[in-house]
Amino acid sequence: MSKKAPVSKRENPVWIVDDDDLISRLLSHWLVQRGFIVETIKNGRDALESMTNSKPPRLVLLDVMMPFADGIEVLTNLRARDSWKKVPVIMLSSKSNETSIVRAFEAGADDYVTKPFKLPELMVRMNRLLR
């Protein structure tokens, strides 16, 4: 029986889909410093287009409230694609009400983190999903 080689952080990018440029830049810098390849996407419409033209990423950090298509619409579309069904998705949102959280999980989110968030906690949540 052979062992699988460890998965490299460089295999596929982590997608950051967020219309807040400051959050996107902060997350991107932080993840690149930890060895990840990162692709930033500025809104829901661009995320939907990127899904059509890209291989599935390693993980998606997905904002809930964005212009053109919200995070729930993006997530629903992502989960409808066979090759994307198992991509881990962490929703990022300033909405902390039960309805928003339940809606995200019902759409297929793997985790939900409210803004503002602590980067070390986000990394723990990411690592749990990337195992």
Image (tube, helix red, strand yellow):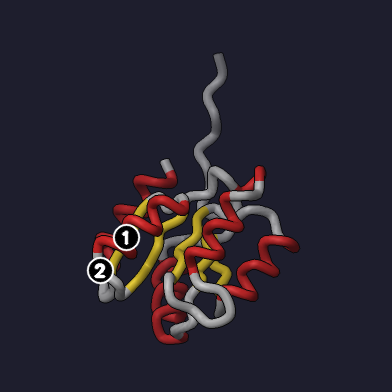
> Is any part of residue 13 visible from this angle?
yes
- 122 vs 4: above or below: below
Q: Quadrant of the C terminus?
A: top left
Look at 50% across and 72% down and name the residue there.
Answer: 70
Q: Looking at the picture, how far across and down is residue 11, in whole percent?
A: 60, 51
Q: Which mark is residue 18?
A: none
> Is any part of residue 37 visible from this angle?
no
Look at 40% across and 46% down and name the residue there.
Answer: 129
Look at 26% across and 62% down and name the residue there.
Answer: 120
- 20 vs 108: above or below: below
> Which residue appears farthest toward the top when viewing the image?
1
Mark count: 2
Q: Which mark is residue 96?
A: 2
Q: Which residue is mark 1?
A: 101
Which residue is more in the foreground, 16 or 65?
A: 65
Mark 2, other Cα within 10 Å: few <14 / some 14–19 / many ≥20: few
Amino acid type of disc 2?
Answer: Ser
Which residue is more in the foreground, 118 or 49?
A: 49
Q: Looking at the picture, how far across and down is residue 19, in whole percent?
A: 49, 82
Circle 1 sits in a helix, a strand or a loop, which is it?
helix
Q: Do the numbered discs 1 and 2 sit on residues whose CB atoms are within 8 Å?
A: yes
51 left or right of 95 in image: right
